[in-house]
Amino acid sequence: MSPKNTDHRFPKPKHLTSHGPARVIALCNQKGGVGKTTTTINTAAALAEYGRKVLLVDFDPQGALTRGLGVDAEEGNTIYELLLDRKLRASDVIIHTDVPGLDLLPANIQLSAAEIQLVAEPGREKILSGVLRPILGEYDVVMIDCQPSLGLLTVNALTAAHGVMIPVACDYFALRGLELLIRNTVELVQERLNESLKIDGILATMYDSRTLHSRSMLHQLYEEYGDTVFRSVIKFTVKFKDSSEKGRPVTQFAPSSEAAELYRAVAREMVDRGCAP
Ligand SMILES: Nc1ncnc2c1ncn2[C@@H]1O[C@H](COP(=O)(O)OP(=O)(O)OP(=O)(O)O)[C@@H](O)[C@H]1O
Ligand SMILES: [Mg+2]
């Protein structure tokens, strides 16, 4: 029997039927293509399988998280309208996805205008935090998929979050960008906007054990960041591209694949580390 079936916390005990207040996690890395969106979708879907109620926030104008869940956000309200229209409620914009227990605040390319439009707003860094506050009681976890930049949207996500999870590809350039993210952005947000922000962990992604480069990068990651690095490692596999093409998490697209098990392990590690209830 796999650990998920023997451990009493997986799935969530039946008597814990109520949800919230949610723990908010920002998935953040200014480097592009390191697996932020893939990690957001699949960890969230695994947490939902384990009985957690999860809200996903697509905070990237590329809208990959939205499309990766098979949602078309070209019509209807999105996170963009929520940020700018104070009369709109998050509950009016939330979409129930095809994954039971998994809801979404979608995004599309319009969100790219928000960065400029919000600059003159008072409390501009705290707008997302205010948008999410009224609905935290309805979820166990909120996961925010950030865009690959350290601009105002990402600062909003870090200000709204209890924790930041940093996916990093097992690649030399991806590793070098970590210092900038942690020492500059995360520490600045902790000093000025959100002193309780925690680094939940660094997750190594796209690991290919056949290459010396991948193995050496993973080794360096553990050397430099120790226990901050998740023990779970996400291997390189085409299953992730296949499942996002079909608009489904890998846990639904290929439920018994190794790829699905890898993200179930991340979800369990998050619970063990206290990053998720
Ligand atoms: N473990 C993996 N193995 C192979 N391919 C992967 C893996 N994780 C993600 N991918 C693929 O790599 C590409 C980039 O992944 P993803 O979109 O999750 O990264 P991202 O950090 O969100 O990118 P961006 O910075 O553009 O938002 C996608 O095509 C995705 O399907
Ligand atoms: Mg992305």
Image (cartoon, rainbow, N blue to C red):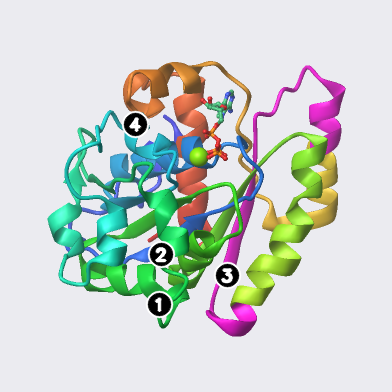
Amino acid type shown at disc 3: Lys
User: From the viewer's perspective, is residue 178 above or below residue 255?
Assistant: below
Determine the image quadrant of residue 82: bottom left
Secondary structure of the residue carrying tag 4 is: helix
Amino acid type shown at disc 4: Arg
Q: Is residue 107 left or right of residue 99?
A: right
The quadrant the N terminus occupies is top left
**Between tags 4 and 1, which lies in front?**
1
The answer to whether residue 215 is magenta is yes
The CA span between labels 3 and 1 is: 26 Å
The answer to whether the residue labelled 1 contacts the one labelled 2, judged by CB atoms less than 8 Å apart, is yes
The CA span between labels 3 and 4 is: 29 Å
Q: Is residue 67 left or right of residue 102?
A: right
**Between tags 3 and 4, which lies in front?**
4
The CA span between labels 4 and 1 is: 30 Å
Crowd rating for badge 2 (residues with CA inside 10 Å; few <14, some 14–19, many 20+): few
Secondary structure of the residue carrying tag 2 is: helix
Residue under numbered circle 2: 117
Secondary structure of the residue carrying tag 3 is: strand
